Amino acid sequence: MKRLHGKVAIVTASTDGIGFSIAKRLAEDGANVVVSSRKQSNVDAAVDKLKKLNLEVLGVKCHVGLSEERKALFEQTIQKYGKLNILVSNAASNPAVGGVLECEESVWDKIFDVNVKAAYLLAKESLPHLRKSKGSNIVFVSSIAGYDPFELLGTYSVSKTALIGLTKAAAKELAPEGIRVNCIAPGIIRTKFSKPLYESESAHDEALSRIPMGRLGESDEMAGVASFLVSEDASYITGEAIVASGGMTSRL
Ligand code: NAP
């Protein structure tokens, strides 16, 4: 039997990039998966692609910063599949580049609203559903920049550090209930979001110089980590961050 057979998962920001790969992999591993992002046309296109692979998915438009859209995400999930076992909170925003102390207040607020507050609210709002099943899971998508801040992504990096803290705090609170909370800290992964880090030859060379494995990561390489974390194979792991960065330094 597939390892996520019978599970229901929501993956936010899952119509492209890392989120799409995670949604696809969880569905391949047997879960019913709810795919979502801000634009209905992207949701429709992602659902179409996944259905063509014979995967069981539902699409729901959800900008994670909008409470009514988060509410609809949970409502439609329960309406269609009757329960929720897994939340993967993957959305992030980075509206401006620059050092953390150069950041405008409005940019700081936007980054923290989407990257941290919405992730926190999604986790909180998912709990009534997660509590109804045994062995439920939350996974946050942080970043290697949460450990070792990228100079030009100052505030974004701090928001990703906050997610590692949120993972640890929520994991401790929910451990007695059997709900595990973990996070993934990707390195530099080839997606639209990270394009400025590799699209010019000089940026690409600079990125590669920081990656011991000598290549960028691919979204599908993050998907297996997510699938592992929410599976019974990780049944004694909570409050952890798995760094998947081709060897970029995070900690001892
Ligand atoms: P991506 O390829 O650009 O995909 C972004 C996805 O997020 C799209 O489906 C987009 O669809 C959706 N989205 C954007 N803002 C949203 C919002 N407010 N609410 C809901 N959906 C939203 O990005 P990615 O590189 O896969 O990044 C995914 C996560 O990985 C982020 O948390 C990012 O910080 C993290 N990460 C990425 C890297 C990397 O190198 N790529 C490294 C470390 C961590 P719509 O436009 O339709 O909303």
Image: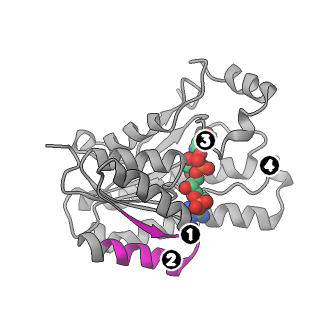
What amino acid does circle 1 point to? His
Q: Residue 191 — which label?
A: 3
Above or below, comparing residue 133 to residue 235 in the picture: below
Secondary-structure class at tag 4: loop
Q: Disc 1, ligand 1: is the CB inside 8 Å? A: yes
Q: Pointer 3 and pointer 1: residues touching (CB < 8 Å)? A: no
Q: Residue 228 — which label?
A: none
What amino acid does circle 4 point to? Val
Lower position in the chain sequence, tag 4 or tag 2:
2
Spatial CA distance of label 4 from label 2 is 28 Å
What amino acid does circle 3 point to? Thr
Spatial CA distance of label 3 from label 1 is 19 Å
What amino acid does circle 2 point to? Glu
Mark 3, other Cα within 10 Å: few <14 / some 14–19 / many ≥20:
some
Q: Nearer the viewer, residue 47 or 74?
A: 47
Q: Residue 63 — which label?
A: 1
Above or below, comparing residue 94 to residue 127 in the picture: above
Mark 1, other Cα within 10 Å: few <14 / some 14–19 / many ≥20:
many
